Image (cartoon, rainbow, N blue to C red):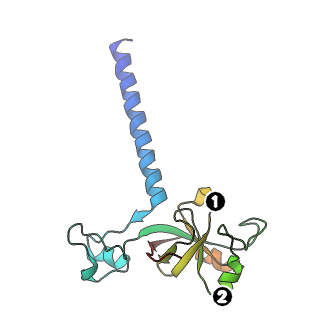
Amino acid sequence: MNAQSKKALYWLIFITAVTVAGRAINIETYDRGSEIFCDTEEFCDVAGDSDDSSRSSESGACSDEKRGLVREVSAYNSVPEQTDDSPCISADGTDICRRYKKGECIVATNAYPLKTRLRIDKIGDCTVADRTHVRYSHRVDLFMDKDIEGAVNFGVQKLTVIELAENM
C-alpha cells in the first residue's frame, strides 16, 4: 500500500470513529434526557428550586430532591390501538384503569423501574406502572384512560421529571 492510500485509510478510520462516537453520545443523551443544573438562578427556577439553601456549594448542582431530567412527556389511552388487547392491565400487572379512576397518576416509561415515583412538572406525582414501545423508551407517557382528545391536545411536551426517593 502506498503512502497516499495509507493516508486515505487513516482519514477514513478517523472519520468513522468520530461518527460512531458522535452517534453514541447522541443516543446516550437521547435516552437519559437533559440534566438540570443550578449554575444560574434561571436553571434552578426551571427545576422548581429557587431556594439557595438546597444548592451544593462545591458543584453548583441542585440538591438531590430538586435534580431532574428534562424529558419528552406524552400521553396515551387505554385502547387496543395504543396498547394491546388488554389495555387496562399494565406491565406491573395491575388494573391501571381502576387506579386512574381512583385519582392516581400513572405513567409508562422504560427509563425508570416499575413502581418508581416521579414528580413531573405541571402534572404532579405519578407512578411508573407501564412500559412504552422501544421507539419511545426515552419518553414518559402519561396515562389518560379513554380521554383520547385530552391525550392528543396534551401532545409531546418537554418537562422536568424528578425521581422521588420514596418508591412504593
Q: Is residue 117 left or right of residue 108?
A: left
> In the current view of this chain or complex, which residue is farthest to the right?
85
> In the current view of this chain or complex, which residue is farthest to the top?
2
Determine which residue is flagged by label 1: 133
Q: Which quadrant would residue 89 be assigned to in this image?
A: bottom right
Q: Is residue 116 left or right of residue 144?
A: left
Q: Is residue 39 above or below residue 100?
A: above
Q: Which residue is located at x 41 percent, y 49 percent?
A: 25
Q: Which residue is located at x 60 percent, y 56 percent?
A: 135
Mark 1 vs mark 2: in front:
2
- Identify residue type, mark 2: Lys
Q: For the residue labelled by badge 1, is the local secondary structure a helix, a strand or a loop?
A: loop
Instruction: Identify the image quadrant of the C terminus.
Output: bottom right
Q: Position of residue 41 (x, y in %)?
A: 27, 77
- Identify residue type, mark 1: His
Marks 1 and 2, how far apart in space? Answer: 26 Å
Determine which residue is flagged by label 2: 102
> In the current view of this chain or complex, which residue is farthest to the left?
58
Disc tally is 2
